Image: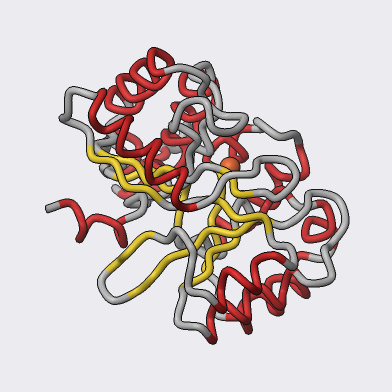
Amino acid sequence: MGISLGRIWPGRFFQRSIEPAPPAAPYWDFHCHLLPGVDDGLRTLDETRIAIAGLQHQGYRGAVLTPHIYPGVYDNDPEGLRQAFADLQRSLEGGFALRLAAEYFADETMFDAIAQDDLLYLPLGDQKVVLVEFPALMPNPCGMDVLVHLSRAGYQPVLAHVERYRYIQQEPSAWLDKIRHTGAWLQCDIGSLVGQYGPHPQALAHDLLDRDLPTLWGTDLHRTTQLERYVAPGLVLLTKHGKRINQILEEQAA
Ligand SMILES: [Fe+2]
C-alpha cells in the first residue's frame, strides 16, 4: 500500500514546493569597482555602461562605488576619486543611482585619515559608513585597531568580504566575536556563495548566511563577466533564503 507524501507532511510540503521564492530584488549594490580606470576594476566607460546594464538586468537600481584606496598599490585619494566620480556621472545617461565611497586597506595610514576626518564614506541617515578590507592571508597587526578607531571617531566601519580571509576561515567564531566588539558590520560577496573564490570562502559565506550575520551584500564587481557567472546564481540563492538584499540602504533611494 502506497503512502502519499501529503499524509506524511500534511499540506505544508506541497504548498512549499509550488510557492514561488519570496522576492528579494536587490535595490542597491554595496561594494563594486565600477569607477573606470582607477583601480583593478572596470577599465573603460564602455565597460561601466555594460556593467550597469547588467546590474539593472539583475534588479539593481543603484550602486555604492567602492574604489580601492590602498597606499603603494592603488594610490587613490578622496579628492581624486570625487573628481573621477563627477566625470562618470556627467558621462552617464542617468536612470541608475550611484553613490561614492571607497574600499580602504586597513594599514597605519588610516589613523591619520581618521584623525583628519578625511575619509570617503557613505552617508546613511546620521551614519558615516566606511568599507575596510584586511589582508587576505595573514592578519595585519593594526587591522582591528583601525575598526576600533573608526567606531570611536563616529564612523560605521564595515569589514569587506569577511568570508575571504584565510585566518578568519580557520577560526571564524573567535574572529567574529572580536569583530563584533569593534562595532563593525560585516559585508559578504554574493559570488562567494557560489564558489567564485573557492571552497573555503564559499563554506564561510554559507555559515554567515545561516547565522544571518552579514549586514551588507556586495557584488565586488571587477569584470562584467562576473554578473552572469556568479552574481546571478548568488542572487537566486539569497532569494531562496528570503533575504531582502541591502534593505538598510533603501532609505537613501529618494
Ligand atoms: Fe573590492
Q: Which image quadrant is residue 27 in?
A: top left
**As rendered, which of 114 and 99 lies closer to the eye?**
114
Return the x and y of residue 170 as percentages of the image width and height: 85, 59
Q: Which residue: 29% across, 22% down?
A: 57
Q: Is residue 24 visible?
A: no
Asked whether residue 72 is in view, the answer is yes
Q: Nearer the viewer, residue 105 or 114?
A: 114
How many numbered circles are shown? 0
Measuring 18% from the left and 51% from the top, which residue is drawn there? 253
Where's residue 140, x and y in %?
Answer: 82, 64
Q: Is residue 243 left or right of residue 253?
A: right
Q: Is residue 125 above or below residue 56?
A: below
Residue drawn at point x = 64 percent, y = 44 percent: 75
Does residue 148 sit above or below 229 in this rendering?
below
Q: Is residue 92 above or below residue 241?
A: above
Residue at left 77%, top 44%? 200
Q: How is the image coloured?
A: secondary structure
Ligand 1: image quarter: top right
Left or right side of 214 for 56: left
Tell me: 2 left or right of 161: left
Residue 215 placement (x, y as % from top left): 46, 62
Q: Position of residue 145 (x, y in %)?
A: 71, 78
Q: Nearer the viewer, residue 27 or 147?
A: 147
Residue situated furthest left in the rendering: 254
Seen in the picture, residue 36 relative to 50 is either above or below; the reply is below
